[in-house]
Image (spheres, rainbow, N blue to C red):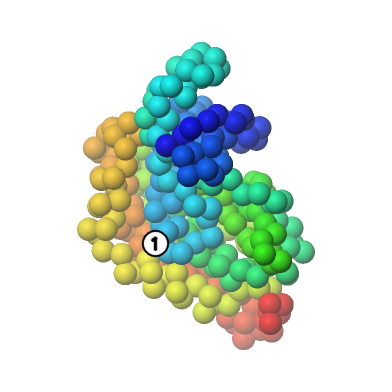
Amino acid sequence: MALEYLGSVGVGVTSPQLFRANDGKVYVVKLQNNCMGPKVLVNEYVASWFGTYMGLCFPPSGLIEIDQQVLQEKRRFRRRVIKPGPHFASQYLHRNRYVTRHDLQKASNKTAMAGIILFDHMFHNIDRTKNRKNLLVCHEDAVYMLYAIDNSHLFVRGRWNAESLEKLAGKITINHWRTYGWLLKHFLERSDFIPYATKVKSLGQHKLAALVQSIPEEWLPKSKEREALLSYMNTRCLMVDEIVSKLCQSIPDINGCTHFNQRK
């Protein structure tokens, strides 16, 4: 439950806002009426669920309820006609900066990026590398930790429908942009992908159906789009070995070449 509005984040096409919740923590909140529409919240919700299931390095996230009293405290919210109800929140990360190539060398959890890369290829998210602001490094307890944030642009652009999901479901396009190219060439091994792929393969249709059913009605009212989303996820989970295989073709030693594994 949101208790206090703290201000705008100041960056991001969806105009995220900062709220303090009843657990005392600060969250980056995407509102239902953001300029890209409520499917952005669906994308974030799906990513949060997979992040928890696969053990991905996403910040803690999930639904946040914002009631009428909190909304009425700010005139800007009254003008935008923001409805009370469920919105999406990700815990704010303190002491963070955008990831550079040098950060990958010293990060203690860089093998966790195998899970992020796999997830992004399952859901056609090219924004993680196209937008360098979606990968952060944080200094925590004397170590550097990598985090992936902002899952607005799943399914290529974030704005999708049943027909576009059907077209995307069987496609595999490998993303070699910036950070992912560095990781695949210098830091990751095929074995780093296996635990995440194993998790995905253990997903049954009943778990995915329960995920789709749990999406708030306000965010995804059309049953046809819910069915298309479930079908897409079923297809991608069945393709996970093929996706990993294509990703690993970018790891130098997959073809017998020298592998410059700088994390050892």
Residue 193, horizontal then vertical, whole percent: 50, 72
Residue 106 visible in rendering: yes
Please state if 145 lies on the left or on the right of 167 as rendered.
right
Residue shown at the point (51%, 19%) measured from the top left:
73
**Against 222, is 155 above or below?**
below
Q: Residues within 10 Å of mark 1 (few under 14, many from 20)?
A: few
Residue 156 visible in rendering: no
User: Looking at this view, is 168 or 82 the one in front?
Assistant: 82
User: Looking at this view, is 119 or 236 the one in front?
Assistant: 119
Residue shown at the point (53%, 53%) measured from the top left:
59
**Against 65, is 56 above or below?**
below
Amino acid tagged 1: Tyr
User: Looking at this view, is 180 or 136 the one in front?
Assistant: 136
User: Looking at this view, is 17 or 252 the one in front?
Assistant: 17
Residue 70, horizontal then vertical, whole percent: 47, 24
**Against 233, is 223 above or below?**
above
**Against 114, is 212 above or below?**
above
Residue shown at the point (24%, 37%) measured from the top left:
223
Please state if 72 lies on the left or on the right of 93 as rendered.
left
Which element is circle 1 on?
helix
Answer with the quarter of the image where residue 110 lies.
bottom right
Please state if 169 lies on the left or on the right of 12 as rendered.
left
Residue 155, horizontal then vertical, whole percent: 45, 46
Residue for badge 1? 53
Residue 27, horizontal then vertical, whole percent: 54, 41
Q: Quadrant of the N terminus?
A: top left
Image label count: 1
Q: Quadrant of the C terminus?
A: bottom right
Residue shown at the point (25%, 52%) measured from the top left:
209
